[in-house]
Image: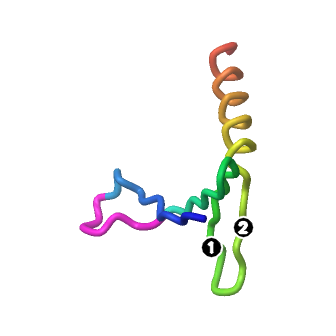
């Protein structure tokens, strides 16, 4: 398993803030966002890609 921070590279801050973590376990990729001190939200990478593609297609068709 490998975990890596995803930073907001377009931030104006000297140290870019962390947006989320990406966790890679073989072929399985998950994004993990810390909601508050004791709550973590996760989403599979494939779900994210699917929803972004759908939004892009919707935007193109308008």
User: Above or below — where is 51 with respect to 53?
Assistant: below
Q: Residue, x 65% and y 58% (percent of image)?
A: 25
Q: Tell me if 16 is positioned left or right of 56 in this view.
A: left
Instruction: Please check the rendered image and state whether residue 31 is part of the magenta-colored stretch, yes or no.
Output: no
Q: Bin the neighbour count of mark 1 within 10 Å (Cα to Cα): few under 14, some 14-19, many 20 and up.
A: some
Q: Are marks 1 and 2 in contact (CB under 8 Å)?
A: yes
Foreground of the two, 41 or 62: 41
Q: For residue 1, what is the image quadrant?
A: bottom right
Disc 2 marks which residue?
41
| The residue stretch that appears in magenta | 12-18
Disc 1 marks which residue?
34
- Of label 1 and label 2, which has the lower sequence position? 1
Distance of label 1 from label 2 (alpha carbons): 6 Å
Kindly give the residue lying farthest to the top in the view shown.
61
Label 1 residue SS: strand
Q: For residue 23, what is the image quadrant?
A: bottom right
Kindly give the residue lying farthest to the bottom in the view shown.
37
């Amino acid at each position: 398993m490998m975990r890596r921070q995803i930073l907001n590279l377009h931030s104006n801050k000297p140290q870019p803030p962390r947006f989320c973590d990406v966790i890679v376990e073989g072929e399985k990729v998950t994004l993990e966002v810390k909601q508050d001190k004791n709550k973590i939200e996760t989403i599979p990478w494939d779900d994210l890609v699917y929803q972004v593609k759908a939004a892009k297609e919707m935007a193109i068709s308008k």
